[in-house]
Amino acid sequence: RDLSGQVPIHIFLQNLPRKNDDNMMHLEFFCKELLKAYPDAIMMEDKHGFIPFTYEIANWVNKLKATLPREVQKKDSFEIIRSVQSLVNSHHFDIGKLRTSDLDDFVRLSLNMLSWIIDNINESIGGGTENINGGTQQNYANPASKVVNRIASIPYLVAAILLIG
């Protein structure tokens, strides 16, 4: 880990060039190889609480939320969905702002990788301990549950996904 608690997969993902037209398959392959070599890396949170691949998704959700009218942005996920539906029905909001085209390649890569990880992580790790905050050990019997919990903890994720559909 580096000083910010990041492991190589975190650092690799942060340093990807943003213009990566046809390289997504290669990136996904490389990420899988990194995780196969060190499967515990997916359980490692950085100092901001992000496991690999969740930072891109959280940023995307924040950008999507910022496109909503200010009075809607302050509401919880359920109320956001209801408010946007009302605004669209009354023609006060262009739902075209919330299309899947806003889902850039890196968010897609992150979602694909997290899906692959959830499907494969219990076989790769199968339980163990995690070094938290420089020394204390925490047991994780079901690694997939931890990954799902970290994804689910991204504020407004469900609302964002439902709005783009």
Image (tube, rainbow, N blue to C red):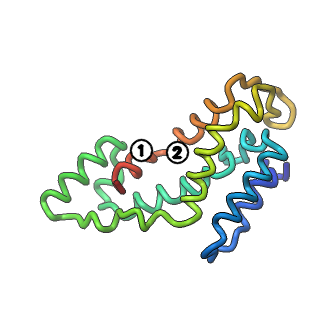
User: Circles 2 and 1: CB distance less than 8 Å?
Assistant: no
In the rendering, at what x and y percent does residue 131 appear? 82, 33
| Picture quarter with the C terminus | bottom left
Which residue is pictured at 66% across the width and 71% down the height? 23
In the rendering, at what x and y percent does residue 5 appear? 79, 48
- Reading the image, the residue beneath label 1 is 158
Q: Secondary structure at mark 1?
A: helix
Return the mark for residue 82. none
Badge 1 amino acid: Val
Q: What count of labels does the image hold? A: 2
Residue 25, image quadrant: bottom right
| Crowd class of label 1 (few under 14; some 14 to 19; many from 20; radius 10 Å) | some
Residue 9, image quadrant: bottom right
Q: CA distance from mark 2 to mark 1?
A: 9 Å
Residue 69 placement, left or right of 115: left
In the rendering, at what x and y percent does residue 143 appear? 69, 31
Badge 2 amino acid: Ile
The label nearer to you, 2 versus 1, is 1
Residue at the left extreme, as displayed: 90
Which residue is pictured at 60% across the width and 58% down the height? 109
In the rendering, at what x and y percent does residue 116 appear? 63, 45
Residue 144, image quadrant: top right
Q: Secondary structure at mark 2?
A: loop
Q: Is residue 162 above or below residue 101?
A: above
Return the mark for residue 154. 2
| Crowd class of label 2 (few under 14; some 14 to 19; many from 20; radius 10 Å) | some
Q: Nearer the viewer, residue 110 or 124?
A: 124
Residue 2 placement, left or right of 114: right
Which residue is pictured at 22% across the width and 52% down the height? 85
Residue 58 placement, left or right of 120: left
